[in-house]
Amino acid sequence: MLYQIFTLFYVISLACLSIYGLQALLMSFLYLVKRNRNPSIPPEPQEWPSVTVQLPVFNEKYVIERLIESVSNLDYPSSKLSIQVLDDSTDETTHLAASKVNYYRRRGVNISLHHRNDRTGYKAGALAAALPSAPGDLIAILDADFLPPNDFLRQVVPYLVADPQLGMVQTRWGHLNANYNLVTRAQAMLIDGHFVIEQTARSRSGLLFNFNGSGGVWRKACIIASGGWQADTLAEDLDLSYRAQLKGWRISYLPKVVIPAEIPPQISAFEQQQYRWARGAIQVLRKHFTKLSEGKQISWMQRLMAFLHLSGYLTHPLMLIFLISSLPVVLDRGHGLPYMPWLSLAGLGGPLLFGLSQVSVYRDWFHRLINLPILLCLGIGIAFSNTRAVIAGFRHEPGVFERTPKYHLESRHDVWQVNLASLHMDVNIIAELILAVYSAITLGFAIKFFSPLVPALVMFMMSFAYAGFTGLIQSQPGSFLRQPRNKNPHNPLILTTRKRSQNPPVNSRIY
């Protein structure tokens, strides 16, 4: 009887995972069909609308000056451009920001610093508090780790001018430090999969999709009409996107406009970021479940794909259920398992989507595909952390918005030195190492009793071992991700930095 219960859990988890795998295949297919259907480029407006660029920051002392400098040099009519630095910081970020703001104000830039003494509502609270004082009809939002090209607004704003029903335009995230280490390479491919394939497929197929929190321009009237920024989830960007679309506003995606951003080089920082995104997505699913179910303004296909979109992080608890139930199934030699031939096809969904994103964008795609196994290991390796996030997301507490640390890394040639004592040993690392051992034990029995599970168990063992040991090494006090000779004793963090280019990398082609 016990074996039958575990077999049932095994089959259910595998069947549910296959649904998300098939969804990835569908996204890849829609992308291939729709990728050349670019929206027509609108003419340059006769009169440019007013734009306010909002920069929500919290304790970003290493990148705040770079951010303000970049945004202050945007190519847009100065009489129509205003910049708001929304600072909730408790460290020297505020002083650095104030100094930089004063510097550009003396040079005629309409820039202001808005400092809050508390973080009520976190990022959503900062955006909501500043919105009434934003003079712009359009609101551009950029996080601290983004470096917009000079013509960012000139490329995006004409679309909003040409279509009054267009509530938001999202641009594609690029990478400043994709090749820095294995963790950043894997994340770059993960981001490309979402922005190159998924966002393109969803937006051009009429499916609901989302603002990604940075690199987008909103119509202020759309924000207000949709209920404004709300802090009852950790995914205020996803929440507002769905509220706007459910109220009839259109949002658009421009994959040709690329804004590079910094990728966190530590696996613990990546887990922290993913935890926030996973918990926030489940909170948004819970919040909008009834409206999506009713679907008065959207089709059944839009509803179905919206549910799959918002529930995508359920794949992580499903992975854990699959792994834990695998040992009893193996010991029972797979007795009672149904024949599910579509699983092999569904299993190709994720790898195909991420691989296609590299082929579509980069000339050196063949070499980039080498990073695919690392991405798969990273995606599986954070399953325990994201399972905790999913469980927390079904509770009613919004949770704490934990920022993702940034270190002013712009390429693999930047060398840096950071004491990682703050990245302490936590329950995720312990659980990942335990799951790696459990996978190894199950693998040993599978080799003897049920060989069809061997490939999957090898992947699980490698993934949890990679996540656990990498996190363990990075959690040791005094350990360093990269520890070269300090060439700049006046800055303990940044040792050398190449001047960034305003243009995309030479090995990148824009489709």
Image (cartoon, rainbow, N blue to C red):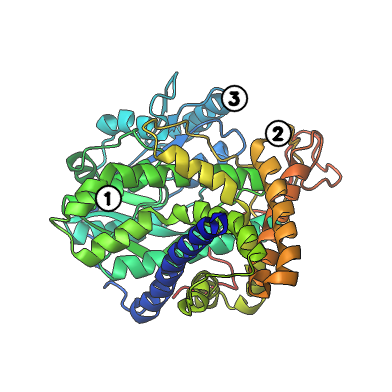
Cβ atoms under marks 1 and 3 closer than 8 Å:
no
In this rendering, the label closer to the viewer, 1 or 3: 1
Q: Which mark is residue 92?
A: 3
Q: CA distance from mark 1 to mark 2?
A: 36 Å
Q: How many marks?
A: 3
The spot of residue 157 in percent (x, y) is 29, 56
Q: Residue at x 31, y 77 (%)?
A: 37
Quadrant in the rendering for residue 453: bottom right
In this rendering, the label closer to the viewer, 2 or 3: 2
The spot of residue 198 in percent (x, y) is 41, 66
Looking at the image, tell me whether mark 1 or mark 3 is earlier in sequence order: 3
Is disc 3 surrounded by few (<14), some (14 to 19) or many (20+) residues within 10 Å?
A: few
Q: Amino acid at mark 1?
A: Tyr
Position of residue 304 relative to residue 75, above or below, is below
Looking at the image, tell me whether mark 2 or mark 3 is earlier in sequence order: 3
Position of residue 215 relative to residue 333, above or below, is above
Asked whether residue 178 is in view, the answer is: no
Is disc 1 surrounded by few (<14), some (14 to 19) or many (20+) residues within 10 Å?
A: many
Q: CA distance from mark 2 to mark 3?
A: 23 Å
Q: Amino acid at mark 3?
A: Glu
* Residue projecting furthest to the right: 485
Residue occupied by mark 2: 424
Is disc 2 surrounded by few (<14), some (14 to 19) or many (20+) residues within 10 Å?
A: some
Task: Depth check: give the residue in front, 63 or 369.
Answer: 369
Looking at the image, tell me whether mark 1 or mark 2 is earlier in sequence order: 1
Residue occupied by mark 1: 242
Q: CA distance from mark 1 to mark 3?
A: 36 Å
The spot of residue 135 in percent (x, y) is 26, 36
User: Which structural element holds mark 1?
Assistant: helix
